[in-house]
Amino acid sequence: MKQSLAVDLGGLRLANPVLAASGCLGVGADVPASLVDVHRLGAVVTRSLTYAGSKGWPTPRAAETSSGVLSAVGTQNPGVQAFLAHDLPRLRKGGVPLIASVAGSSLNEYVNVAGALHLQEGIVGLEVYLSCPDDEREGEPFYGRIERLTEIVGAVARLSRVPVFAKLPAFVPGIVETAQACVRAGAFGLTLIDAVPALAVDAERLRTKTAMPVGGLSGPAIKPIALAAVYRVARAMPHVPVLGVGGVTTGEDAIEFLLAGAWAVQVGTAMLVDPSAHVEIARGIAEYLRAKGLTSPEDLRGRLRVRGQNGDGA
Amino acid sequence: MKRVRAEVLSARRLGAYHSITLVAPEVAERVRPGQFVSIAMPTGRTFLLRRHFSVHQASRRGGWAGTLEFVFDPRGPGTEWLSEVRAHRFLDVIGPLGKPFAYPAKLNACLLVSEGHGSAPLYFLAQELRERGKRVDMLVGAETQDRVFKPIETKRLAQSIVLATEDGTLGEQGSVLDLLPQVVESTGAQVVYAAARRSTLRGIAEFCGANRIPSQVALEEQMACGTGLCFVCTVPVIRKDGSGYDNLRVCTEGPVFNSARVLWELWMGDQPRLTPTPPEGFPVARSWPG
């Protein structure tokens, strides 16, 4: 049978399982076409959008850490109306399915942003970004309390005509319970994981390396953490689409996520370092499938065996 | 902008700095002063992000056609790795990136002020300004003698040159900021270009603002991608109409900015971080004379 990289996320069909993660491809209108071959992506998750836009946090906004990047950008974005006017037409021209990342500081804002986006041509899904500070809870992130998180996800899911993915960090109280609550609230799938809260210290100057002390860690440093979250959630809910994200840099990384139970992967930090990372990752997946005599990335999903069980101890 | 695999033609020490010359015709033919290139780090190390360097020299003609040179101060794992790169190795290069310095259309006397290896892109600018028939004067400084970048080179490039070191080991004693008023006076500078530490650039911006001299500054801010994707390297810049400010990316909307439009006190963090726009708006900066 002929090999194909196409994947079906419960009805949402993508040409390949390699997606651009939110925030790693500019806003849209400004992606340098000579550098990033957007057509080769399975889908693009947009920069997180708020209703009126945001200036983001002061600089420095990033610090390089061991095998990772700590960033504290603060959802800088032009706002949903400017996105629809300037960026969406350009992104749509690329012909790649778009998943719009929805952010906000209140339930109302999430609903308004999602409402403005979900019926737009070219947008095939929404991803709910839950690490924003919640105005009603003194700036604590939305993911901090399971009731608050499901309230937001549920409200977006009820209004949206396209599938809604909830993007969760690994350190929510009980990742499996939280993921299940999101699905009960109406989420179609999950994006696992969001950047890991992290701090970088400049000991010489006795100060933090970023202007917002705690940022989000991404890159290869968080891959094993992301794999664990994907593995646990996918085992508990094998029929719910999971998008694996966290340190995917090579085809092999992507394979690991698929084996752990992801339906597709998102590439973030690797795109910032190598704008054609997604092309190499897709090629790596194809080569692996060929070597294993498989025809589809879906053949790998959740196929991870546990060492030491069923005579697999050697 | 292009992404190329470029061969290292030469790698050498230059005083306290390092210099690398690359064979990269696609980039060298397009690059203009103030623009930069981005270099990928080796895979399999713990430092991931690309490093970004202003272009010091680009040859379009002659025996060195198609080459470009950048200069850096080896500090931290990325630049230390790069300082050990030898000739004939290939590097993953993206460039040219960012917006270049604008040349003045009518004004003639240009003063170029730089500190440390900030001089590297300004020597490139000096050359281009000379080719356009402009008068170029230079004020070049550093903490100490061996950190003054190529002091002899300046004589070829500029009508007049003032060197300054903070410890007095070369040229005048003091910072370029201390010497700026007298150099502007003696050279009759009509336009100022600068690449230096933040605090110095801010001083230059204040001086030029007070004396109504148009000035362009090359800013540095912590970068991640260098290509406009990540929004890490932003600087608050006042809108043209004064109606507010935007956090603009140094890598894409910069690194060269009109110094009168940079909100220095906000960028440098000596003001409450979330400044509202004053009801009367921000002062409208004169646009660049060109």
Image: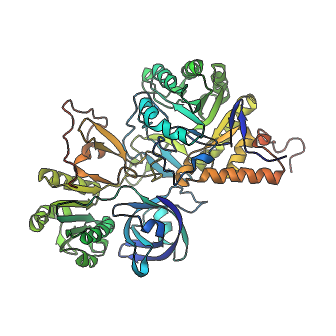
Residue plotted at (75% across, 28% down): A239
Residue A147 in view, yes or no: no
**Residue at far right of view:** A311
- Where residue B166 appears, as percent x and y from the top left, is 22, 67
Residue A114 in view, yes or no: yes
Q: Is residue A3 left or right of residue B203?
A: right
Residue plotted at (53% across, 44% down): A217
Can you say whether A52 is above or below B140 in the image? above
Can you say whether A234 is above or below B173 in the image? above
Residue plotted at (42% across, 71% down): B68
Nearest the viewer among B241 and A134 is B241
Q: How is the image coloured?
A: rainbow
- Where residue B169 appears, as percent x and y from the top left, is 22, 75
Nearest the viewer among B44 and B205 is B205
**Residue at far front of view:** A93
**Quarter of the rendering containing residue B181:** bottom left
Residue plotted at (84% across, 44% down): A308
Can you say whether A58 is above or below A177 in the image? below
